[in-house]
Image: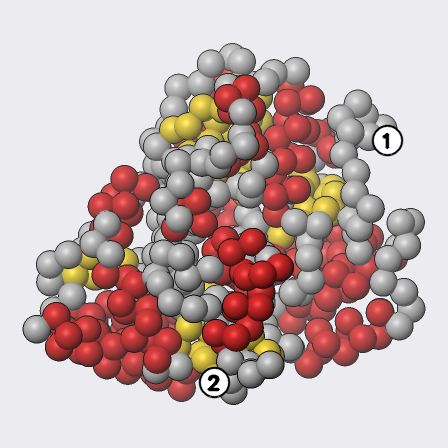
Amino acid sequence: MAETNEAWFERASRVLPGGVDSPVRSFASVGGTPYTVASGAGATVTDVEGTVYLDYVQSYGASLLGHADPMVVRTIESVAKTGTTFGAPTRDETLLAEAITERVTGLEQVRFVSSGTEAAMSAVRLARGATGRSTIVKFDGCYHGHADSLLTASGSGVLTLRLPGSAGVPEGAVRDTIVAPYNVVPSLGEDVACVIVEPVAANMGLVAPAKGFLEGLRRECDRIGALLVFDEVITGFRLAPTTASELVGVVPDLWCLGKVIGGGMPVGAFGGTRAVMGELAPRGAVYQAGTLSGNPVAMAAGRCVLEQATADRYEALADRVARLADGLEAALLDVGFAACAPRHGTLASLFVGSGSQRLAAPRDLEQARAINGSGRYAGLFHELLARGVAFAPGAYEVLFCSFAHDDAAISRTIDAAHEAATALRAHDG
């Protein structure tokens, strides 16, 4: 078989629905054929044709250190030689749990699972069991995985593919789910078990919390006895050596974690106080289980990442992300594109709209949709890809820089963005 992206995608499409194992990997919203990755190293990936891309997908945030970090690879090799799964307690899960709880105020116990979806689904079940209530509140544009009760009005791939939710989710599954606009504190009824929120929204592009929003959610949950759940699958240990809760000064009752804490291996976790977590089986009545939960390879890889994720490295990364965001925005505005590149610490995203002015950063999904409705992201995506820079194939994802993205990578990306926008402007006539 020819080693081309087209040939591999055609082959994949015969045995994988849509040719992919996750909709966000498809090029459905931008057009064209996805590249098939053969390898990754640091800030780059190489496809089956040998083309090297500066990678701002980084497994949608899981690769904080960059691809194939040597210390992580050595750790995985060492642990795998002793066995990859046992269905029994291991030292590695305890060591990673200790590393996580030591860093996060209020987080006393965690339970590991295999994905962010499992973490959010389990946290909601725990909240319902602990409170004896059924209603949950989520926010428009926030993505908490693909569990039925949380998929309604989601961000990420659901937005990218212009889906209102998902076929196969019965009306009863979302009957107890209330959806509120992000950055607006809702008035809660006493039937609410929990409010689940991304403390920094990163699945409708980057939308930062407005002043007082998270504090208001904390007060409203306390008023009626509901639990506050922070979905930090993306933000946990991505923004800082701890969670976003530490940065914003609001302590939730439950956290959902994933991505970074697995060192590139499949992982998820949810946690909270000993009192709340004590509601879980085997001590409590809320059942949750998983054959591969606490997988020793993932646990060791995650701990290796956290050991290398020092405060000075986050500070340096935040500086580079600021330079990237400012540079992308300036490059597009210089050519006459309407754009904004909001950032929050080590996270940023790029919005490209109609007109030629600097855009205000969106505060909610409605504003994000209004910008992305221009459809201009797709053209920019392909022009960047042609210049060896890979953003996510969807306008509602954020840009993930790793510690491996150095100053040269940032400069190259900004230059490529200016060239890409200039080419699009010339094509528009």
Q: Quadrant location of the N terminus?
A: bottom right
Closer-to-camera residue (291/281): 291
Closer-to-camera residue (81/126): 81
Q: Characterize the local packing of mark 2: few (<14), some (14-19) or many (20 or more) Cα atoms within 10 angstroms.
A: few
In the image, taking residue 316 as reference, residue 364 lies left or right, namely: left
Residue in the image at 48% along x and 36% along y: 166
Indicate whether 218 appears above or below 210.
above
Where residue 111 appears, x then y in whole percent? 74, 43
Read off the residue under disc 2: 51
Given this view, does label 2 or label 1 mark the residue nearer the observer?
2
In the image, taking residue 128 as reference, residue 43 lies left or right, namely: left
Where residue 235 appears, x then y in whole percent? 52, 53
The secondary structure type at the circle numbered 1 is loop
Q: Is residue 282 visible?
A: yes
Quadrant of the rendered structure where residue 141 is? Answer: top left
Indicate whether 259 appears above or below 232.
below
Where residue 293 appears, x then y in whole percent? 78, 48
Q: Quadrant location of the C terminus?
A: bottom left
Residue in the image at 39% along x and 19% along y: 187
Q: Is residue 334 visible?
A: no
Residue in the image at 20% along x and 54% along y: 374
In the image, taking residue 124 as reference, residue 320 lies left or right, namely: left
* Tag of residue 282: 1
